[in-house]
Each structure stands twice: as C-alpha cells, then as structure tokens.
Image (tube, rainbow, N blue to C red):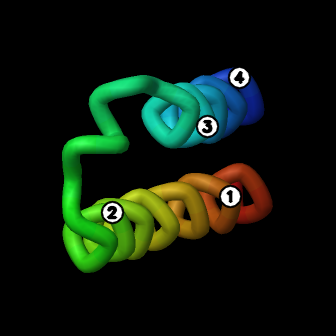
Amino acid sequence: MFWSQVRELFEQIVSSLDSHSICRLEHSHIESKLLENRYELLRRLLQTKIF
C-alpha cells in the first residue's frame, strides 16, 4: 500500500516535468516545486520503512 502511494507521487512529479505547461514557468518556480515534492517523496519513503 505505502509503496503504491510513493510510486504514485513519483509518477506525478515526472508527469508534471513532462507536461507542456512547465515550459511557461520560470526556472526558479520549477526548482521550488521540485524541492517541495522531493521532501514529500522522501517523507513517504521513510514512512514505508518505519511501518
């Protein structure tokens, strides 16, 4: 269960980076979103190890 949630978040991140709408964003905004997503992804990965 946890792994599927982690994988889903990862796929969402990849999908957003692959979308056409990302071309309209500034580089700094893209980096900020990646940082937010990275922390959430790492948090969920850690939770899978704990539970």
Q: Name which residue type carries label 2.
A: Ile
Q: Check disc 3 and report the residue beneath it.
A: 14
Q: Residue 45's mark?
A: 1
Q: Position of residue 43 (x, y in %)?
A: 51, 66
Locate residue 47 relative to residue 1 in the image: left or right.
left
Q: Position of residue 7 (x, y in %)?
A: 70, 31
Q: Residue 4's mark?
A: 4
Q: Earlier in the sequence, mark 2 or mark 3?
A: 3
Regarding mark 2 in the picture, which secondary structure is present there? helix
What residue is at 34 percent from the left and 43 percent from the top? 23
* 2 to 47, vertically: above or below: above
Regarding mark 1 in the picture, which secondary structure is present there? helix
Regarding mark 3 in the picture, which secondary structure is present there? helix
**Structural distance between the alpha carbons of marks 3 and 1:** 16 Å
Circle 4 crowding by C-alpha within 10 Å: few under 14, some 14–19, many from 20: few
Q: Earlier in the sequence, mark 1 or mark 2?
A: 2
* 15 to 6, vertically: above or below: above
Regarding mark 4 in the picture, which secondary structure is present there? helix
Q: Check disc 2 and report the residue beneath it.
A: 30
Q: Name which residue type carries label 1.
A: Leu
**Foreground tag (4 vs 3):** 3
Based on the displayed image, in which of its 4 quarters is residue 24 positioned? top left
Q: Residue 23's mark?
A: none
Circle 3 crowding by C-alpha within 10 Å: few under 14, some 14–19, many from 20: few
Q: Name which residue type carries label 3.
A: Val
Locate residue 24 relative to residue 48 in the image: left or right.
left
**Structural distance between the alpha carbons of marks 4 and 1:** 11 Å
* 33 to 20, vertically: above or below: below
